[in-house]
Image (cartoon, grey):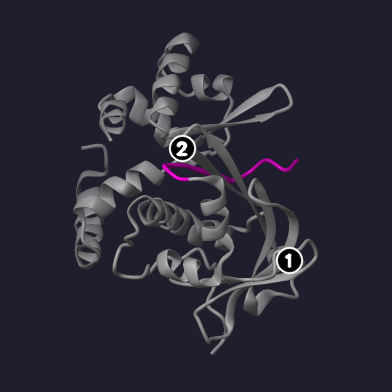
Amino acid sequence: MDKPQFVYVTYILTTADKVWTALTDAETTARYWGRSNVSDWKVGSAWSHRLPGEAPEVVGEVLEADPPRRLVTSWSPASKAADPSRRSRVTYEIEQLGEKVRLTVTHTELTEEGLRDISRGWPAVLSNLKTFLETGRTIPDPFSNMPCQEKAPA
Amino acid sequence: MDLVFKALADAGRRRLLDSLHATPGQTLGALTEGQQMTRQAVSQHLALLEAANLVTTVRRGREKLHYLNPVPIHAVQARWIAKFERPRLDALADLKAKLEGDDDG
């Protein structure tokens, strides 16, 4: 296993199934993440991260899917989809601990550029996800620092 | 949130977080090397930081790697800092760092 560059953990008062849905449902991700995660979430399928109705900003492949426990995806900026050196890997681990869920997001194989953008994005996404699942509310303003690595070309 | 503030209310623990921010994924041994503390003291501080969810650990073989987990700090920020204030606060923090050469004030 490659040594992870970032490991983010949040504890959420909810169920593992709800966390799985919140990570994989296009409509739900749009509400707290500001972008939709779109895929059928089968191993080998493509996934993308995009503003509803717009071109993808992040693209990748579903590498592992074990609902509602574990999801592994590859990540590339859409404009660098063909460049394997810009491909990173995101692992979501969902553990039910009594009435709480421990959600761990591990990001590995990032380049320097990717690192800079990611390190500002994930804490915002995860703290908004927690607020969303626990209260049904989100921070009204969408994020300016999304972990998108790079904007898609216009 | 009490645990987060308690964990942050110690200069030694803040230095450990600085060290993990600079170099993610350190072992206890590596973390102890950079500090003026015994291995046991570092280990106790890490336990407190882990209880506050400010540090998270990953097992890799026989090693235990430590990571700064900034999610709870983001929650503190999101609670009291409105998005429109952020650029001005960033500018003030940059100015302070430039003038004082130190951001641990």
Q: Is residue B96 left or right of residue A93?
A: left
Q: Is residue A105 left or right of residue A108?
A: left
Q: Kindly identify the residue that appears in the image at 43 percent across and 14 percent down.
A: B44
Look at mark 2 in the image and give the residue it sits on. Answer: A100
Q: Kindly identify the residue that appears in the image at 47 percent across and 55 percent down.
A: A122
- Name the kind of residue labelled 2 in the image: Lys
Q: Earlier in the sequence, mark 1 or mark 2?
A: 1
SS for dot 1: strand
Q: CA distance from mark 1 to mark 2?
A: 29 Å
**Mark on residue A61?**
1
SS for dot 2: strand
Q: Residues within 10 Å of mark 1 (few under 14, many from 20)?
A: many
Residue B93 image offset from top left, x and y in percent: 23, 53
Residue A47 image offset from top left, x and y in percent: 67, 70
The residue stretch that appears in magenta: A1-14
Q: Residues within 10 Å of mark 2 (few under 14, many from 20)?
A: some
**Mark on residue B64?**
none
Q: Is residue A42 left or right of residue A135?
A: right
Picture quarter with the N terminus of chain B: top left
